[in-house]
Amino acid sequence: MRGSKFIRGTPLLIADNTIPGLKLPEEISKLIPTIIKACSDFGLDFYPIIVQMLTYAEISEVAAYGGFPVRYPHWQWGMEYNELQRGYEHGMHRIYEMVVNTNPCYIYCLDSNTLVDNVTVISHAIGHNDFFKNNVYFSPTSQNMMNELANHGTRVRKYMQRWGKEKVIEFIDNVLRIETLIDPAKAFEKKIYKDPIVKDSRKYHQPVHFDVKDGHDYMDSYVNPKEWIDGQRKKIEREDAADFLEIFQEPIRDVMGFIRDNAPLKPWQADIIAMLHEEMMYFSPQGPTKMLNEGWASFIDFKMMAEKGMCCLGQDNSDKGIIQYALHKMGVLGGKYSMNPYHIGFCLFQDIEERWNKGKFGAQWDDCKNLKQREDWDQKLGLGHNKVLEVRKYYNDFTAIAEFFTPEFCDKYEFYEWEHMPNGTYVLLDRDPKKIRKKLMARYLNGGLPDVRLVDPNHRGKRVLFLEHRWDGQLLFPPYTKATLESLRYLWGNTVCLSTRNSDDKEIVYVCKHGEVMIMTREDYERVDI
């Protein structure tokens, strides 16, 4: 009857023999209420949690499915599972836990974890849970995604039975190649459901025709020559096509959404791309917030385990688990030279808490140029706790780096540019905070992905898709670019073009026509017939 407690409002549903996985050990199940209370007392606001214990094979399978073991059948899940399994068997990596953004929030623990590790990862996962619930970038995401993804899987399986597994998978493969061409900001827009009633509301236009005086009809061919009328008709066709395709004033980022709404797709294809677009929108906030999300979860487990002393729960050895926790933490953060998102995010939250506790912000702090005074600065404001809660709510990786990666922070934690030498040592390449922050901001802008937008879906009046890469100095990777354009052409059913720049900063154009991708200069492109 443990499930009935969840129905009555308890924030915990402990996995048992009726739930896939292993029975939760008594030593950890009796500690979970203590962990939950400590996190709540710290000020975290999180969804109810379901804790499940899995073997490594099981947690690898869940991880391969992105945390949702109910998804549609596809070969990519098997490839990811095999990669995770091989990595574990060869000692290259280890999945301690997984947590998914749902209500209730599922937390998967590894059965081979020690007690200290499990207390750590549950605290860490509750930090993620709190971030999912409170960060504004996750606010539009569905909290019922476990059921929605299960429904998607069921519908895809029905299409496979009706149209053939290979045919459906081929279509999904092409859709997945354009999965990053979405606009996460559209998740905040109010959803508009189209009128299911078929009706024709188009306005029809006719060529401009100059009147001739009565009795002078023989002049019509001179006043309205055939070339003039034909030119008018072509112009109208282009304008009607643009109106039909809802041509926009500015380029759009949601290329996948445009294909969903306008490509000549069969009903089952339109349904699949709509489902996958919905899934991509659900997962989209995780990219731009990965550093802050992981940093917040690492900050929370540090607060619980080290400052609140929860590493000693259930421990009877002399060090009370603190050494094992320190080793765990060192492995996650990666040490002094690491620039992984856990390390940067964790240090940012630590620094923000200290600065706002001591009053190291504002005009007075900015105007102080005395290094000794800045070092000893402490106004004892105690605002750090509220500030870190504010940052986890309103910021993403890019805005956090832009505002809080200060020169003092860079020097304090030595986030310099290092080069790892073959002999295992590190050589300092650059310690300029401005340059390092600029590189980090470029890494976290748009989740590190190129900004590609659709500028014209009826290019040259031929229904050619023309896309534009917003140049930021980063070259496109040709194999990925060609594969993406091939899939866009497959879905759109016509030629697709993409403008970008090469290493010489010269504009080039990719042209995908008849399944072949050509690369040419902009000058050559303007001369060819597409």
Image (cartoon, rainbow, N blue to C red):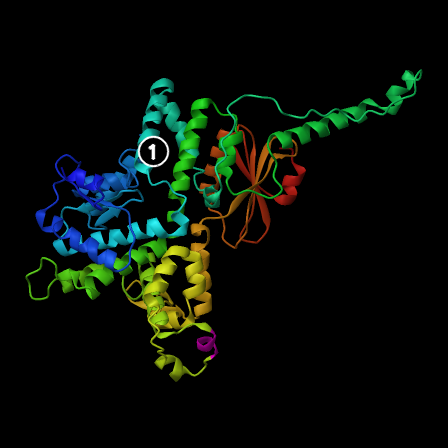
Q: Quadrant of the N terminus?
A: top left
Helix, strand or loop status at disc 1: helix
Image height check: is 217 above or below 390?
Answer: above
Q: Quadrant of residue 418?
A: bottom left
Is residue 221 visible in the rendered image? The answer is yes
Please identify the dominant SS of the magenta region.
helix
Q: Is residue 396 visible?
A: no
Q: What residue is shown at x 84% (from left), y 24% (from top)?
A: 224
Residue 111 left/right relative to 150: left
Query: Does residue 428 belong to the magenta stretch?
Result: no
Instruction: Tell me which residue sits at (54%, 43%) in the image.
Output: 453
The magenta segment: 363-367
Q: Position of residue 361 (x, y in %)?
A: 42, 72
Residue at the location (43% across, 27% down)? 271
Image quadrant in which the C terminus is located: top right
Q: Horizontally, is 518 left or right of 449 in the view?
A: right
Q: For residue 203, what is the image quadrant?
A: top right
Horizontal and vertical percent for residue 267?
Answer: 45, 23
Q: Nearer the viewer, residue 507 or 468?
A: 468
Q: Position of residue 344 (x, y in %)?
A: 34, 61
- Compared with residue 367, is residue 530 higher up or lower down, i.e. above or below? above
Amino acid type at mark 1: Glu
Residue that carries the numbered disc 1 in the rendered image: 148
Q: Position of residue 495 (x, y in %)?
A: 56, 32
Q: Nearer the viewer, residue 110 or 29?
A: 29
| Residue at the outermost front position | 8
